Image (tube, helix red, strand yellow):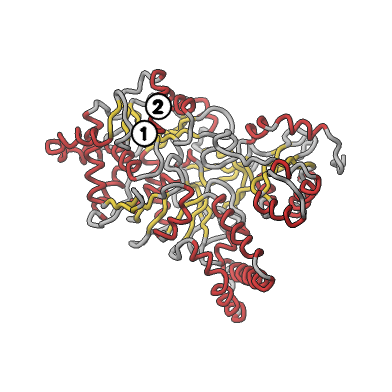
Amino acid sequence: MTEPRTLNELFFQAMDEFGERPVAMRAKRGGTWQELSYKELLAQVRTLSLGLAELGLERGDRIALVSENRPEWAIADYACLTAGCADVPVYPTLPPRQIAYILRDSGAAAIFVSSSEQLDKILAIRAELPALRHVITFDAAAGGPNVLPLAAVQEKGRAVEVERAGTWRAAALEAVPGDLATLIYTSGTTGEPKGVMLTHGNIASNVAGSLNVLPLRNDDECLSFLPLSHIFERMAGHYLMLGGGAVINYATSIDTVAAEMLERRPTFVLAVPRLYEKIYARVLDAGVSGSALKRSIFFWAKRVGETWVDHTLAGRSVPPGLAVRYRVAYRLVLSKLRARVGGRIRYFVSGGAPLSADVARFFYAAGLPILEGYGLTETSPVISVNKPGRTRLGTVGPPLPGVEVSIAPDGEILTRGPHVMRGYYNKPEATAEAIDSAGWFHTGDIGMLDTDGFLRITDRKKDLIVTAGGKNIAPQPIEAMAKKSKFVASAVMLGDKRRFPIMLIVPNADNLRAWALHKGIAGDTLEALLQRPEVEEKMDREVRKTLRDLAHFEMPKKLLLIARDFTIDSGELTPKMSVKRHVVERNYREQIEKLYAEPVAHPEPV
C-alpha cells in the first residue's frame, strides 16, 4: 500500500485495511468503557461531513473545535477534513477572551463544543464573532438558542446520505497535499498566539515518517490524555494510531490516567516529561520510606538496573554476573514499576520539553523504554525521535526519514522538508522571519548533531539568559538538575540582563512537610513553613547539592521560595506545560526586585 499523501487518504486507507476490526476507539461513559468500531467510525464521519455541507459550510471554511479528548473530537476532525474544511482546535482550558481572539483571527464559520461549560464560553462571546454561523454541541444536554446538537447535524447528513454517499468519498479524496488541514494556534512563551497553517501533506508526511520509525502491531493500544488540541497528541495519538491500526482509549481526565492505565493496559503512551518525573519521584519516595533493609534493596536494584542499561544501550555485552544481578533486581523491584502502568507497555514516547537522562535510564531498567523525540507545532510536529533498538539517552534521536536538520553557526537548529508548515496565518512577516529563502525553518532551539546523527537539544535560543556581565546561561538544563531533588516540585531560572541569575523554587509540599514534622518545625500552611529560616536553609542546601557541578557564573545566587505551583490558568504555563518566563517574572516582580536589592553572600567575581 502506498504511503498516504493527505489525511483523507490516510483515513480511507485505514477504513479499507482495518474496517472489519471491532474496536477503533473506546471512551468511558457512566463508568463503563464504550467501544466504537471502524465501521461505526466511518458511518459517523460520513453523516457528519455531509451534515456540515447541508449547513452551507464549504471547502476552505474554518471550523473550530473546543473539546476534551473523546471520540467525538476524532469524528468531528475527520468530518471537517473530508468536507474540505480546515479545523481550528482550541484548548478547552482557555478562557473566553483567548478563545475569542482565535475565532476572530481564524474567521471560524462554525464551532464544535463538547459540553455546557464550553458552550457557555462561546455564548458569552458570540456577539463579538460575526463570522461564526453555527455552534454544534457534542453533549445533548448542552443547548440553547441557535445551538445544534451533534446528532441533529448528523441527521441532516443522513437525510442526503443515499444520494450522496457514492460521491462523498471521491470528493474527499480530491484533497491535495498542499490543502490546508488545520490552523493550530501556538500559545507561545511570548507575544500573541500565531495560527500555524499545517497542510494535509505536512501532517501525512510526518505520520508516514513516524510509522517507519515506530511501527505499530495488531495488538497495540494507546491511552490518549495529552490534549488533542496540540499537534503532538494529534499527530501521534490520533492520526498515527488510526494509520497503524492501534486502538485509541480516551482517558476520562488527567486525574484518572493512573487508574485507567491499569484498566486498559496500553502498549503505547505519549506523555510530557512532567508525567515521567512525577512517577519517578513517587517511586523514589516509596523506596526511601520503607525499612532500612527495603531501602538497601531498592537502591541496590536501582544501581544494578542503571548499570545494565548503560551496557545495553552502548551495545556492550552484559557480563554474566551483571545479567544475574539484573534479573534479581528486576524481579524484586523494577518489575513493580512496569506493573503500575499496566504491564504491557512496549514503549513510552516523550516530547514537549527535555527529559532527564536519569529518569529515562530508570524507566528503561524497568523494561519501559522512553523514546524521547523533538519537534514543534510548525513542524507537524516531529523532527527527530529515538527509536526501539537505537536509543541514545540525553538525545532526541536522529531526524525522521525525509527530514533535513542543520545547525546554524550560532547553534540554532534548522529543519527543512515536507513537515514544515505553510506559514503563520495572516502574518507574512512572522512567516518570513521563521522560514528563510532556502526553506529552512528556524526552530529557536540550540543544539548539536553528534557523529552518529543523533540530535541533542541544549536550550531555547530565546530562553538563553545573558547576564549584565555578558555571560550566557542555558536555564533549562539547570532547572532539570534542581528538580532531581525530592524537595523540588518546579524550578524557573531568571536573570536576563541582571547582575546574576536567581531561581524560583516551588517545593514539593508533601516531602517538605514530612521533613519539617520530623525536625519539629511548626507551620500550619506551606506559606508559613517557607517563612522559617530553617526551611529556607534546607531548601538552599538541597538545590545547591543538585547544582554543585555548575560553573560559578551559572549558579543561581539567590532562591525565591513560592508556595503555589505554576499553572496554565495563571498564564505561567502554556497548555503543553512550557514555562512562560516573562509571565512568571511579571507575576513575582515585587519579590524578585526585593531579592536583587539585597546583598549577595557570594558575589560573582569580576
Circle 2 residue: 122
Q: Position of residue 431 (x, y in %)?
A: 50, 30
Q: Nearer the viewer, residue 573 or 170?
A: 573
Circle 1 residue: 113
Q: In the displayed image of the protein, which residue is found farthest to the left? A: 163
Q: Position of residue 257 (x, y in %)?
A: 46, 52
Q: Is residue 73 left or right of residue 300?
A: left
Along the polypeptide, which appears first: circle 1 or circle 2? Answer: 1
Quadrant (top left, top right, bottom left, bottom right) of the N terminus: bottom left
Q: Residue at x 57, y 50 (%)?
A: 274
Q: Nearer the viewer, residue 90 or 412?
A: 90
Q: Position of residue 486 (x, y in %)?
A: 67, 55
What's the distance in space between the residues labelled 1 and 2, CA to CA?
8 Å
Circles 1 and 2 in contact, beta carbons < 8 Å: yes
User: How many other residues sit within 10 Å of disc 1, few (<14), some (14-19) or many (≥20)?
Assistant: many
Residue type at the position of mark 1: Val
User: How many other residues sit within 10 Å of disc 2, few (<14), some (14-19) or many (≥20)?
Assistant: many
Residue 374, placed above or below residue 67: below
Q: Residue at x 59, y 49 (%)?
A: 354
Q: Is residue 165 left or right of residue 278?
A: left
Q: Residue at x 71, y 38 (%)?
A: 494
Q: Secondary structure at mark 2?
A: helix
Q: Position of residue 513 (x, y in %)?
A: 69, 51
Q: Is residue 422 left or right of residue 528?
A: left
The answer, for residue 393, to whether it is visible in the render is no
Residue type at the position of mark 2: Ile
Q: Residue at x 55, y 30 (%)?
A: 433
Q: Nearer the viewer, residue 389 or 518?
A: 518
The answer, for residue 263, to whether it is visible in the render is yes
